[in-house]
Amino acid sequence: MIKQFTFNHFAENTFLLIDEKTRECAIIDPGTKSDLEAKELFLFTEECKLKVTHILLTHPHIDHFCGVEKVCKHYNLPLTMHKEGLEVLSSFEQLADSMGFEAVNAKDLQKNFVEYNTTIILGEYTIKTLDASGHAPGSIAYYVEKENAVFVGDAVFNSSIGRTDLFGGDLELLLSNIRKNILSLPLDTEIYPGHGPKTDVDYEAANNPYINNLDF
């Protein structure tokens, strides 16, 4: 089961991946900017009797990790991310105020570093980590075959792709990773992006003006 929230002034999508049998839950990209947004998230997991076991980060941009300090402390969990994102995460902590966010201290949080093409177990789900870098270093797409879903952060949007003009961005790398690691998934795989509505592999391969002509 997938539950979507949209938080902060960047309209960022925060997802809950829920194994309904075990009630284990992963929070993907906690973008809770305000105490009110954090309370909404906490209340939902409490009322649904969910056991949050993972806090997963797709990429280290402030609109996606602005809530990590409160969320990780509330659930007493580390932040799961790729090590290559540390430098970007640190720089965006410092830029928080200029982007309309409160200061975030993610530096002192306990972290669980994962590599690409490894697996994370969530109840009866197996989550595969895919290289989605190009929008930002250390970007991870989380693929859940049992749910027929992939959480891509800002790598791919409905009919678009992530920007590559920020620190560490690389258009060629992004397009390559989209082709190899996202569009190679089964065509009916639903794509859950960091902003905007969901889409699927079939639609993006056929219609996305940035990537549909790739020779894959």
Image (tube, rainbow, N blue to C red):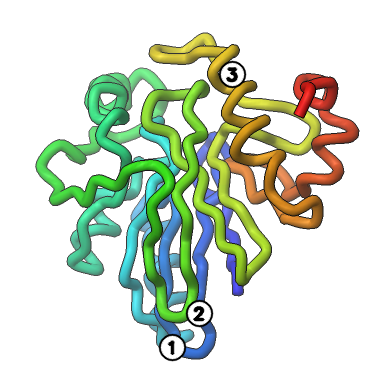
Query: In terms of secondary structure, where does tag 1 sit?
Result: loop
Question: Is 176 placed left or right of 68 in the picture?
Answer: right
Identify the residue under disc 1: 22
**Image quarter of residue 157:** top right
Question: Is 165 drawn above or below residue 10 in the view shown?
Answer: above
The furthest residue to the left: 108
Distance between mark 1 and mark 2 Cα atoms: 6 Å
Quadrant for the N terminus, please. Answer: bottom right
Identify the residue under disc 3: 163
Residue 52 image point, x, y percent = 34, 73
Mark 3 belongs to which amino acid?
A: Arg
Query: Is 153 or 142 nearer to us in this picture?
Result: 142
**Total count of labels:** 3
Question: Is 162 placed left or right of 204 in the picture?
Answer: left
Mark 2 belongs to which amino acid?
A: Asp
Identify the residue under disc 2: 19
Please give the name of the residue rendered at 41% of the width and 79% of the height, measured from the top-left corner: 123
